[in-house]
Image (cartoon, rainbow, N blue to C red):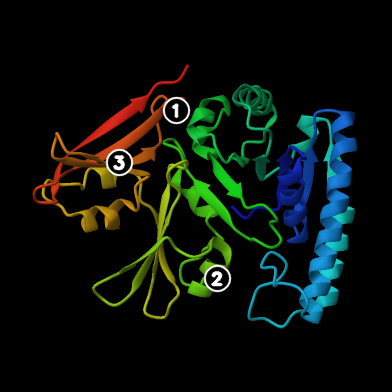
Amino acid sequence: MSYKTVCVAGGGVLGSQIAFQAAYCGFDVTIWLRSEGSIGRTQPKIDHVREEYIAAIEGMADGTGEWCSGIADGGQPFDKEAALAAVERAYSTLKLELDLAKAVADADLVIESMAEDTQAKIDFYKKLAPVLPQKTVIVTNSSTLLPSTFAKYTGRPEKYLSLHFANSIWKNNMTEVMAQDQTDKRYFDELVDFVKPGVTTQADVRSRMGEPGFIHWNDDGTATWEYARQPNGSSCYMITFGQDHVVAKVEQVLNDANYAKVRVGMSKDDIRRLLGAPGSKQLFDNLREEIWEWRIEGMPPMDETYFMVHFDTDNGGVKKTSKRVAVKG
């Protein structure tokens, strides 16, 4: 599905930025707010974001400011007037709405960007579920809470996942996408559109996601860039480039299929290549073990779950795997 209409739930600092950036890119955007007081707090944030965009565009045009990848693609001639026109179009078309049913009536995508309060988010999803059109995909912008925590409350877990934006989005045109166990893969694929296999270059990926944590060199001379989100996140993206330095494949490697590939005797390099950097490493001399640990999606989702690989310190190879659950509540 090609998204055209977007509703952002929450008008805080990041919610306002997300909404303005989406409007700047040509989407029909509505911000849903809970009260008249929220409107009074959100409108000044939108005004401020508009001024930030204008200042950034002026700096890009005269060479005194940094290049902002959310405003214009690098490597293309910069059209200052077109960018300024897009800012004013975004500012004039962005809508604020208190009625949730009206706000999402034609939404292709709902981006929940509310405070990191688990119960408040659950209450919101329960209120949202009955009024959503069948077509709508829901994402959470949460930076600390796993999407699986809320999936069952959305009424459409197959269309629910995480889409976390970077702050100062006009400068850092970057998002993190994370599915949960019930997410339909096609909705995940829609949301990783910012890294299009066969189109996006290494320079594009570096601009949007920063420097990779590690570069794995493949037998054919191509490279796979690692973006691990440990220890607080539960994802690790491996982006493989072809000989032409264009994205060939994007994979979130912390999944059950890859855990099952771990075999006794595999080396630390093998495991790093398969799962990415662990969140922690611990040495147990009495057990003659070194344990690597990754935070992963939990079951139930409220619990913190970790996948662990045990290495034999005598030969350096894998001895076994295990899981650890830190029960909450």
SS for tag 3? helix
Answer few, some or many: residues within 10 Å of disc 3's Cα (few below 14, many 20 plus, some between 14 and 19): few
What residue type is disc 1 on?
A: Pro
Q: CA distance from mark 2 to mark 3?
A: 30 Å
Q: Mark 1: which secondary structure? A: loop
What's the residue at 21%, 54% (across, down)? 268
Q: Is residue 281 left or right of residue 95?
A: left
Q: Which residue is mark 1?
A: 301
Residue 307, position in %: x, y? Answer: 30, 37
The residue sitting at 52% across, 63% down in the picture is 195
Relative placement, left or right, of 151 versus 228 is right
In the foreground, 59 or 239 = 59
Q: Nearer the viewer, residue 45 or 278?
A: 278
Report which quarter residue 86 is drawn in.
Answer: bottom right
Mark nearer the N terminus (1 vs 3): 3
Residue drawn at (82%, 30%), measured in percent from left and top?
99
Q: Do residues under tags 2 and 3 come within 8 Å of each other at their CB atoms?
A: no
Residue at 63% x, 81% y is 75
Assess disc 1: are there few (<14), some (14-19) or many (≥20) residues with their C-alpha within 10 Å of its C-alpha: many
Question: Where's residue 293, x and y in %?
Answer: 31, 40
Q: Could you tell me the amino acid type at mark 3?
A: Asp
For the question of whether residue 277 can be seen, the reply is yes
Q: In this rendering, does residue 86 appear at all? A: no
Residue designated by label 3: 256
Classify 79 as above or below 249: below
Instruction: Name the residue tied to disc 2.
Output: 204
